[in-house]
Image (cartoon, rainbow, N blue to C red):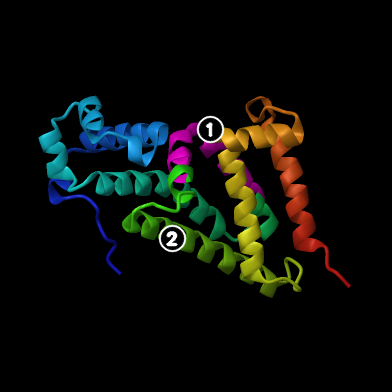
Amino acid sequence: MIEKKYHKEAFERADDKRKNLILEVGIEEFSSKGYENANINIIAKNAGISIGLMYKYFATKEDLFITCLKRGMSVLEKSLDEIMVSEDKLLKKAEKLIRTICQHSKKYSNYIKMYNEISSRKDAPDSISDVVEEIESKRSSIYITSISQAISKGDIRSDIDPRMLALFLDSLLTTLQFAYTCNYYKEKFKVYTDIDIEKLDEEQIVTQLLRFIESAFTYETK
């Protein structure tokens, strides 16, 4: 299947430096102000191009947003894919996922903020909702496949539904992502732990979350 593009051919012909700048400036604007309040004129100005040229690259603000969103999510997806297709046992994959999410959430906080803002909205434009669903479907497929393979190999308990475990695992990791980047989740983390996540040693998070996941993988009910 050919992946749908949300930019015009003129954007593809632009040099990489300009493309990267436009998308990074766009991600900053969308993540700080939200989709509705973000201003494409400001994005063009901060990227050092005219608004006319911006519209030669993108037909609408919606298309620019989707292109920014896809760029941001592709960074984490690439790392996730590499981890999940490895020959590691599932618990080792989980450890690598936690570490990667901790590191990515701090390094690419704007990407996570943008995704949280739009994925939590019920009134998002249909095309944006479709992209969010595409991202979630791709991620769920990777988790379900990896968990099913682990069950068939006898690496984890056999009395669980791969789809349900994939959902719960993703929910834990997504919450961790948002705890580093989004105010609501930061405060929630502090309420429950009495610790500011930005001051917490990453190893503590990895150790505690991994212990919880390991018990879910290995403890079998009678």
Check residue 106 in the rendering and tell me which mark sits there, or answer none: 1
Residue stretch rendered in magenta on the structure = 95-115
Residue 95 is left or right of residue 18, and the answer is: right
Residue at the spot 29% in from the left edge and 62% down from the top edge: 3
Residue at the spot 68% in from the left edge and 72% down from the top edge: 161
Q: Position of residue 150 (x, y in %)?
A: 66, 68
Check residue 133 in the rendering and tell me which mark sits there, or answer none: 2
Which of the 4 quarters of the picture holds residue 169?
Answer: bottom right
Q: Is residue 198 above or below residue 31?
A: above
Q: Position of residue 163 (x, y in %)?
A: 61, 69
Between 152 and 190, the one nearer to me in the picture: 190
Between 218 and 197, the one nearer to me in the picture: 197
Which residue reaches farthest front?
Answer: 123
Which residue reaches farthest right?
Answer: 222
Question: What amino acid type should be assigned to the residue bearing mark 1?
Answer: Lys
Mark 2 or mark 1, earlier in chain: 1
Q: Is 84 covered by the magenta stretch?
A: no
Q: Is 106 covered by the magenta stretch?
A: yes
Residue at the spot 25% in from the left edge and 43% down from the top edge: 61
Q: Position of residue 198 (x, y in %)?
A: 62, 27
Q: Is residue 143 visible?
A: yes
Question: What amino acid type should be assigned to the residue bearing mark 2?
Answer: Glu
Does dot 2 land on a helix, a strand or a loop? helix
Q: Nearer the viewer, mark 2 or mark 1?
A: 2
